[in-house]
Amino acid sequence: MAAAKPKAKTMRQVCEGYIGEKVAVLAARYQYRGLMSQVSDDVITLANAAAVEVSGPSSGDVPNTEDPINGDVHISLNAVEIVYRPNWVNAPLSGEA
């Protein structure tokens, strides 16, 4: 089990706590997964990102349906609703072995 993250007061602080980790992000009703690589005042960047169309159960090994973006995706920090780590977030991303 992963160590608990310190309590954050803002979504930026939440996202900064995940830099360097694979995460799933729900933003403006769209779901993405990738490596949280950067966080700024108004944008987060997910490296090796994928758009998750149907996630399936959180305990699953892979999302049911996703489309690789084959690069980075930049998401407005104001659009971020949830940052989380379901089991399937650890499935290999595009470009990983």
Image (tube, rainbow, N blue to C red):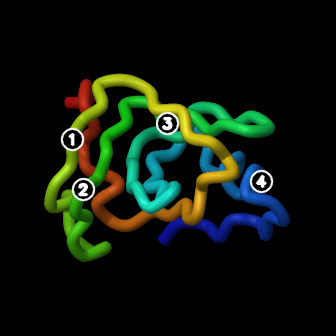
Give the position of the C terminus as an image quadrant. top left
Say which amino acid is labelled 4. Gln
Nearest to the eye among marks 4 and 2: give it: 2
**Does dot 1 land on a helix, a strand or a loop?**
strand
Nearest to the eye among marks 3 and 1: give it: 1
On screen, 77 above or below 60?
Answer: above
Residue of label 2? 53
Which of the two labelled residues, at mark 4 and mark 2, occupies the earlier sequence position? 4
Residue 33 at what x, y percent from top left? 39, 48
Which of the two labelled residues, at mark 1 and mark 2, occupies the earlier sequence position? 2
At label 4, counting other C-alpha atoms closer than 10 Å, the crowd grade (few under 14, some 14-19, many 20 or more) is: few
Q: Nearer the viewer, residue 75 or 10?
A: 75
Tag of residue 13: 4
Question: In whole angstroms, how far apart are the C-alphas of marks 4 and 2?
Answer: 27 Å
Q: Residue at x 47, y 52 (%)?
A: 23
Q: Residue at x 25, y 25 (%)?
A: 95
Nearest to the eye among marks 1 and 4: give it: 1
Which of the two labelled residues, at mark 4 and mark 3, occupies the earlier sequence position? 4
Residue 90 at what x, y percent from top left? 33, 52
Q: Is residue 93 left or right of residue 25?
A: left
Which of the two labelled residues, at mark 1 and mark 4, occupies the earlier sequence position? 4
Residue of label 3? 46
Which of the two labelled residues, at mark 3 and mark 2, occupies the earlier sequence position? 3
Q: Residue at x 28, y 60 (%)?
A: 88
Question: In whole angstroms, how far apart are the C-alphas of marks 1 and 4?
Answer: 28 Å
Q: Are marks 4 and 2 in contact (CB under 8 Å)?
A: no
Tag of residue 67: 1
On screen, 8 above or below 38?
Answer: below
Q: Are marks 1 and 2 in contact (CB under 8 Å)?
A: yes
**Does dot 3 land on a helix, a strand or a loop?**
strand
